[in-house]
Image (tube, coloured by chain):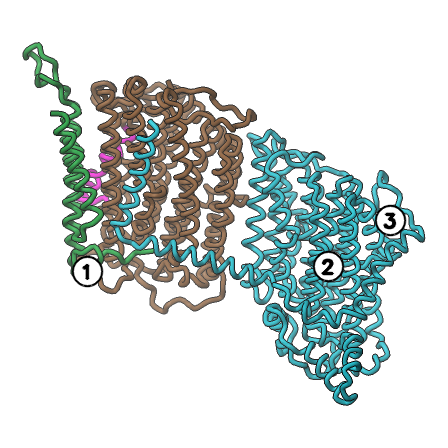
């Protein structure tokens, strides 16, 4: 199980990095960032995985409790990623309005 | 004041330092509804935070001060720890933010509420980043500060700032992801996010995890801070930003990032001990310590990578700065080089080099902030920050020229500016600690840096073309293809004034200049404080 | 003026509560080299100040302040007791010179030629001090010099003292400034470098290198057409002598070397003063034009205003050539006695001969005739049997051709900018000028300047006749014997003979020597190309920016995985 998840995580990360480096459409870059974020979230949740674990509610069975920490971390990270994505999309919209295109070549006025 | 040291105020100070700026974010809105102008309230709030940041310096304060929101403690909750390092950097951050907000009052007076709200968010993030003792909490604060900064960079809404903000946001987001990956690795290896506990448990973790986490965290911070090879976004990111925002980015944010980096390096990983080639003149802690000490080669490998990064930052920063024709980009590359200086000091190991790096971080914050202010003033009078357009500007405003000369001297390392002291000591102590290459690079960096500052200063004093007849509204973009920002102006907004009311801008510049001069005169004091902080950091390693 | 400035800085720095700066400061070192050099600098400041006070156009107050900082730093530097003060004074000397150059016409070029390389020297010195401290050395100046960082210190000294091949800054700035400014600048900068060699690297073992520099620079000097260009190369050459003396392996050359530094300040200053007057009179730096328009058949009877100039020039030329009883003779003899290797000794002899030849040329072209004698040409032409009439016209054409032909790369710059820099009304090219300028106030030597030159001439004579007044008591007594006079004179005679017999032949070959400017220009062009490439590398593409970040991360990972 762990191997599958780690493979997925690494695969998603690789896809996202590849996308960030090669795609020209701004929205696609935002999507790649999101995929990258999701990969990390998966890793976080998996980090808290306990074989045969129990939800951390007092009064349950005697199995080991899963720590709530990674889930809290994941939720917070989702929030942060969402706000970053919102900001990115706002920029993309504004860039489209001012430059007329969403290609990354149009966002290259600063150089050198 | 006698009882202040152990008063309730002091005990809760770390929480206050985060809570007060954060509370001003909604407070400004409500105050404006009631009729209190946003600018006054914001500056008052920042003054309050500045005062709070100086409180730990009161006599009789016992460090470290630990506070935990909700009283949960570090293990279950989040601990905010005010140790010597935080005590040293907090006033720097607060003063930097205050002075930058002061500088930005004029051009932001169309939308003061938005501006100050964002600045307070940034302030919260920076303070929190410095104080927190929880890894993920640090990530949260970094992102908070980051989002505020991104919005501020694009504040004008014009094409240039937009592109800058977009590139900066993408790079910072990726950097955040890298930091998050590092945190994940630490959590996987230790099962906790509380830094002291994680440090203990990392000692028994397999070296792969430790080294991997170190690399990822360092890369994330490097990407956010702008060290080679993660530097390429920085010049673009700062080029379109308003000067006050660029100053915020190069002063307080970098200092907070550096403070956090130190916490991780020394609190989590055990730092770099003194190198083998060090002389016995100034002390260093011998032997291996900390988690990285358990894998000595890994530590030396990491140190080697750190030096490669540092020296290439110095070289790349100065060389690229020489090539620039716009001041903000030039200053951005210069920041990259100075970060390289600081990293040399950190990598060299031992208390003295670390103390030198600390002093340089402090002096650099103010001299870079000051230069960005000068840049902003030039943009106001000339409409652009191109170096070629600055011709004759200092003749018209000699006080500006004097400030520019002082900041340049400080950045290059010429007395009687604070930068001379910090750079001289950094070179000496790095060489002392055995980091020859780094010391030579720093010394050579000064020689490389002078031409590009001299160029601006010389051009500024040349008798040149007269100013344009109509003053250029300084908050307009230079790119022709952007819609007029006035179209977005809310109803009833006051017209922006472009007349020469220097007022607060001059005050901001002069404050920075005074700090630079004061930093030179009192450098001994500064270094001794930094040395005690460095000793504490080194001594805190397990 | 600037001594006060350094004192103020010292007081401010010293009054710190934590004493951070003062823990590095030591009391001034008052040994003979330091006191002697400081005294000579001071005397020269008086003489040069007098000279410049009598020079038109008058210098502005800003210029005097910068010049004062430059000279003040140089006066205080020999007395510095610790490396921090030494470094700060070194920087002050540099900054003062930059200020002076900035206030000259044609400043950007000169400052561009001067400042970057001086900053490299300062950075090298800082690095050397750092390595010295790191190796366990103390910041106090002792007799042993630096423990670590010798290489960097050597670089700093070589640049500051304009040792070949780091001399390019000197030959590109002193000749381009206004004629009289070189009087001020020539005395302080390079001597600070030589003194630094004495303090920082007393056991450098560079005597052979110094001798080589002396000879190579003299060869370049012989090839120069401009007055101040050739004097600048002679600075480089004499610095070679100084280095040979100070670095002499036996250690007995230090008095001679330091005395040579002092002598050089005096007579080189005198020569620059003379050169400034000659340039102002003629409106051009070109030596071949100094007597243009005067009849070449027979020299005019010396006018009264020329007598003092001729005497001053003669004293300077004789001093630098090492003719008894002037001061150059004493110091050169001391140096020659102290060097250990025969190779060094003969190179120094060659250097003296070349110096003598060069200054014979100076006196000849300046006061006698504008045609360099070339007896061999007449000899070879007579042998090939050409007609007499054609002969003389070819001769004249040949000699005029030498005078008016295009120079090395120096000409367009030095003649042109010497023309634009200060001498009013110069055509700026090497084409033959209209006959003579009317003598006006500018052309007169003037009482003030005459006094300055006269004082320096007398000092040259005095330092030569009574060296025991100036040399340290511990030094070996300099015996003014006939043998010493002969040993000083014969290289001079060799040089004079060379000039009259062979020099004319050698001129075309000499003018084809590679110039330092070309090399420097190539280096700068290369640097610019590198910067442009770096700029192109940062092309603003976000994907490239992220790509580098990931590449760096990947490199870090790979390294770790390999080694862990």
Hey, which residue is sitting farthest front in the picture? C384
Residue for badge 3: C467
Q: Quadrant of residue C22?
A: top right
On whether residue B36 falls in the magenta region, the answer is: yes
The numbered dot on residue C49 is 2
Give the chain of mark 2. C
Pointer 1 and pointer 2 on the same chain: no
Q: Is residue B125 left or right of residue C151?
A: left
The stretch of residues the image draws in magenta is B16-38
Q: Position of residue A36 (x, y in %)?
A: 18, 39
Residue for badge 1: A99
Give the brown chain's letter: B
Q: Secondary structure at mark 2?
A: helix
Q: Quadrant of residue B496?
A: bottom left
Q: Residues within 10 Å of mark 3 (few under 14, many from 20)?
A: many
Q: Is residue B528 above or below residue C514?
A: above
Give the cyan chain's letter: C
Q: Residues within 10 Å of mark 2 (few under 14, many from 20)?
A: some
Q: Which of C555 and A105 lies nearest the eye of the viewer? A: C555
**In the image, which is nearer the foreground, mark 1 or mark 2?**
1
């Amino acid at each position: 199980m762990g191997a599958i998840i780690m493979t997925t995580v690494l695969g998603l990360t690789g896809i996202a990095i590849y996308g960030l480096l090669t795609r020209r459409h701004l929205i696609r870059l935002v999507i790649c960032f999101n995929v990258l974020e999701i990969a990390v979230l998966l890793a976080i949740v998996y980090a808290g995985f306990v074989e045969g674990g129990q939800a951390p509610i007092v009064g349950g069975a005697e199995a080991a409790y899963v720590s709530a920490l990674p889930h809290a971390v994941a939720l917070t990270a989702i929030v942060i990623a969402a706000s970053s994505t919102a900001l990115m999309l706002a920029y993309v919209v504004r860039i489209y309005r001012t430059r007329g295109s969403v290609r990354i070549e149009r966002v290259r006025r600063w150089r050198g | 004041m006698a009882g202040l040291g152990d008063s309730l105020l002091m005990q809760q100070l770390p929480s206050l330092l985060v809570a007060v700026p954060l509370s001003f974010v909604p407070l400004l809105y409500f105050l404006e509804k009631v009729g209190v102008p946003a600018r006054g309230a914001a500056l008052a709030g920042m003054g309050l935070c500045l005062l709070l940041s100086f409180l730990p310096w009161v006599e009789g304060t016992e460090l470290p001060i630990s506070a935990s929101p909700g009283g949960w403690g570090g293990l279950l909750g989040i601990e905010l720890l005010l140790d010597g390092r935080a005590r040293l950097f907090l006033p720097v951050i607060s003063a930097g933010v205050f002075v930058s907000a002061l500088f930005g009052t004029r051009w932001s007076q169309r939308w003061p509420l938005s501006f100050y709200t964002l600045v307070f968010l940034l302030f919260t993030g920076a303070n929190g980043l410095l104080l927190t003792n929880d890894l993920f909490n640090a990530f949260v604060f970094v992102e908070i500060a980051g989002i505020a900064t991104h919005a501020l960079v694009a504040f004008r809404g014009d094409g240039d700032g937009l592109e800058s903000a977009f590139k900066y946001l993408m790079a910072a987001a990726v950097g955040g992801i890298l930091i998050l990956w590092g945190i994940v690795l630490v959590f996987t290896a230790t099962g906790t996010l509380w830094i002291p506990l994680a440090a203990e448990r990392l000692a028994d973790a397999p070296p792969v995890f430790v080294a991997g986490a170190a690399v990822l965290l360092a890369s994330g911070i490097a990407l956010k801070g702008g060290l080679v090879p993660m530097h390429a976004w920085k010049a673009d990111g700062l080029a379109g930003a308003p000067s006050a925002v660029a100053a915020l980015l190069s002063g307080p944010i970098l200092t907070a990032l550096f403070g956090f980096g130190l916490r991780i390096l020394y609190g989590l990983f055990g730092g770099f001990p003194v190198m083998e080639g060090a002389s016995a003149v100034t002390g260093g802690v011998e032997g291996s310590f900390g988690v990285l000490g358990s894998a000595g080669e890994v530590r030396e490998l990491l140190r080697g990578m750190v030096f490669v990064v540092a020296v290439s930052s110095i070289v790349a920063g100065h060389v690229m700065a020489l090539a620039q024709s716009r001041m903000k980009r030039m200053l951005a590359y210069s920041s990259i080089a100075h970060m390289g200086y600081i990293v040399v000091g950190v990598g060299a190991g031992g208390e003295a080099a670390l103390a030198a790096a600390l002093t340089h971080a402090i002096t650099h914050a103010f001299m870079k902030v000051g230069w960005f202010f000068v840049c902003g003033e030039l943009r106001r009078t000339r409409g652009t920050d191109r170096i070629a357009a600055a011709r004759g500007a200092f003749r018209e405003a000699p006080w500006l020229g004097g400030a520019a000369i002082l900041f340049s001297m400080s950045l290059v390392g010429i007395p009687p500016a604070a930068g001379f002291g910090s750079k001289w000591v950094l070179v000496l102590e790095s060489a002392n600690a055995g980091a020859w290459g780094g010391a030579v690079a720093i010394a050579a960096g000064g020689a490389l840096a002078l031409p590009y500052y001299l160029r601006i200063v010389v051009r500024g004093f040349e008798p040149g073309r007269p100013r344009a007849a109509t003053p250029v509204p300084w908050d307009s973009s230079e790119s022709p293809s952007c819609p007029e920002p006035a179209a977005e102006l809310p109803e009833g907004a006051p017209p922006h004034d472009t007349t020469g009311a220097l007022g607060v801008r001059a005050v901001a510049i002069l404050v920075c200049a005074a700090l630079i001069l004061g930093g030179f005169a009192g450098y001994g004091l500064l270094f001794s404080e930094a040395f005690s902080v460095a000793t504490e950091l080194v001594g805190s390693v397990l | 003026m600037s001594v006060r400035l350094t004192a103020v800085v010292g007081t401010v720095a010293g009054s710190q509560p934590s004493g951070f700066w003062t823990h590095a400061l030591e009391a001034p070192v008052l040994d003979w080299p330091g006191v002697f050099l400081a005294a000579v600098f001071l005397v020269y400041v008086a003489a040069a100040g007098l000279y410049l006070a009598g020079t038109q156009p008058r210098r502005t107050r800003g210029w005097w302040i910068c010049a004062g900082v430059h000279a003040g730093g140089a006066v205080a530097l020999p007395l510095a007791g610790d490396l921090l003060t030494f470094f700060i004074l070194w920087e002050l000397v540099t900054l003062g010179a930059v200020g002076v150059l900035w206030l000259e016409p044609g400043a950007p070029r000169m400052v561009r030629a001067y400042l970057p390389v001086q900053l490299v020297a300062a950075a090298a010195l800082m690095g050397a001090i750092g390595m010295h401290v790191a190796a366990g050395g103390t910041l106090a100046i002792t007799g042993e010099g630096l423990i670590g960082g010798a290489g960097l210190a050597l670089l700093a000294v070589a640049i500051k003292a304009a040792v070949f091949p780091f001399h390019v800054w000197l030959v590109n700035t002193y000749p381009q400034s206004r004629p009289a400014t070189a009087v001020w600048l020539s005395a302080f900068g390079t001597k600070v470098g030589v003194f630094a060699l004495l303090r920082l690297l007393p056991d450098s073992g560079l005597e052979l290198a110094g001798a080589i520099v002396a000879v190579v620079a003299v060869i370049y000097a012989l090839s120069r057409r401009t007055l101040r260009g050739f004097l600048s190369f002679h600075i480089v050459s004499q610095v070679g002598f100084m280095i040979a003396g100070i670095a002499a392996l036996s250690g007995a050359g230090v008095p001679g070397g330091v005395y040579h530094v002092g002598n050089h300040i005096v007579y080189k200053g005198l020569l620059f003063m003379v050169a400034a007057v000659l340039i102002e009179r003629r409106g051009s730096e070109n030596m071949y034009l100094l007597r243009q328009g005067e009849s070449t058949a027979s020299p005019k009877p010396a006018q009264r205003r020329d007598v003092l100039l001729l005497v001053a020039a003669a004293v300077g030329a004789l001093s630098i050539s090492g003719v008894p009883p002037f001061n150059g003779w004493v110091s050169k003899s001391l140096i020659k006695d102290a060097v250990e290797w025969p190779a060094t000794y003969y190179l120094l002899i060659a250097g003296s001969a070349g110096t003598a030849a060069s200054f014979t040329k100076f006196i000849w072209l300046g006061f006698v005739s504008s045609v360099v004698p070339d007896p061999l040409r007449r000899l070879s032409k007579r042998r090939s049997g050409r007609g007499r009439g054609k002969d003389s016209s070819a001769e004249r054409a040949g000699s005029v051709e030498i005078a008016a032909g295009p120079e090395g790369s120096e000409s367009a710059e030095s003649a042109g900018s010497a023309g634009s820099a200060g001498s009013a009304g110069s055509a700026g090219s090497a084409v033959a000028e209209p006959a003579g300028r009317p003598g006006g106030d500018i052309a007169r030597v003037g009482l003030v300047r005459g006094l300055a030159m006269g004082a320096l001439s007398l000092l040259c004579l005095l330092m030569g006749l009574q060296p025991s007044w100036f040399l340290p008591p511990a030094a070996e007594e300099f015996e003014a014997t006939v043998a010493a006079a002969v040993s000083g004179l014969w290289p001079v005679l060799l040089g004079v003979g060379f000039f009259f017999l062979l020099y004319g032949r050698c001129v075309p070959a000499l003018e084809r020597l590679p110039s330092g400017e070309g090399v420097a220009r190539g280096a700068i062009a290369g640097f610019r190309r590198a910067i442009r490439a770096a700029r192109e590398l940062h092309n603003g593409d976000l994907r490239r920016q992220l790509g580098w970040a990931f590449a760096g991360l990947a490199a870090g990972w790979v390294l770790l995985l390999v080694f862990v």
